[in-house]
Amino acid sequence: MSTIALAPQAEGESLGASIQQQIATVVDDLIAQLPNPEHLTPEQRRGIIARYSAVLEGNFIYWMTAAYIAVKSDEVRPILAENLFEEVRDAHPAMLRKFTVAANAYPSAADALATDEELARVRLFLGKLQSVQSVLTMAFFECWIQRFMAYLADLAGAQGSREREYTDVHGVCDVTHTAELFRALTLEMAANPISPETDLFEGVDLLRNLIIAIVRGPAPVAAA
Ligand SMILES: [Fe+2]
């Protein structure tokens, strides 16, 4: 292979590495902002688990499927299919529900509706089926989930639960999932270049806002 033939690939990989670094910074920032579980009330701890569960249980597979539908590269589709295969075969939503119920944090209507606006924005964004932005959003999601697992386990522990299958599995498998999704991103960017005016981080910003809403919860009701 000539140097000329390698150049665009090398350029794509370098751009991919730079984007991955930016995502790592966003995730670091989100993790650094997490409140100490010991400084939270039991209701605040329950609320974070409940809102996380309300968003993740019904949406993760749906959103990964949206990215799968959106991609144009034949090399990328199997990477996303492998992720979906594991989710479905190992019934990750069932694992999450078991974790949430064990922590007495199964979401109420108020928990589910507390992130309604932010959730709808992410859904509408993924509905636009923009391949590169969708894959980047899911790579960010995997990266954040993997880093969030230890905290989620701590919250459940403080609520008296010892159920750890969900957090143990996702603290490990999402390391590979994140790496694979960043590989998918580089491949999709090569197959389907985005124009310079495109906001590559549109979905990342919306998902970041949703994550902040999961952790923060509803605004306190003002005293009458
Ligand atoms: Fe999962």
Image (spheres, rainbow, N blue to C red):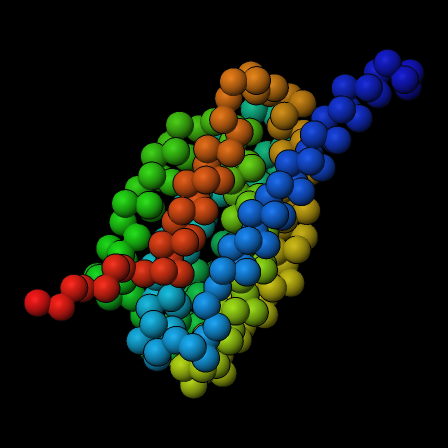
In this picture, residue 67 sits left or right of residue 83 = left
Q: Residue 59 appears at what percent x and percent y?
A: 39, 49
Return the residue nearer the eye: 108 or 38: 38
Instruction: Identify the image quadrant of residue 144.
Output: bottom right
Check the picture and name the quadrant holding the N terminus.
top right
Position above or below: 186 against 64:
above
User: Does the image show residue 158?
Assistant: yes
Return the residue nearer the eye: 65 or 21: 21
Instruction: Identify the image quadrant of residue 161.
Output: bottom left
Query: In the current view of this chain or complex, which residue is farthest to the right?
Result: 2
Return the residue nearer the eye: 214 or 223: 223
Query: In the current view of this chain or complex, which residue is farthest to the bottom?
Result: 160
Return the residue nearer the eye: 157 or 75: 157
Query: In the current view of this chain or complex, which residue is farthest to the top?
Result: 4
Q: Residue 15 appears at what percent x and percent y?
A: 70, 30
Position above or below: 100 against 125:
below
Question: Residue, x 84% and y 16% (percent of image)?
Answer: 5
Position above or below: 14 against 112:
above
In this picture, residue 132 sits left or right of residue 65 = right
Q: Residue 134 appears at what percent x and percent y?
A: 50, 34
In this picture, residue 176 sits left or right of residue 112 = right
Question: Residue, x 76% and y 24% (percent of image)?
Answer: 11
Q: Residue 7 appears at what percent x and percent y?
A: 82, 19
Question: Residue, x 46% and y 68% (percent of image)?
Answer: 35
Check the picture and name the quadrant holding the C terminus.
bottom left
User: Does the image show residue 68?
Assistant: no
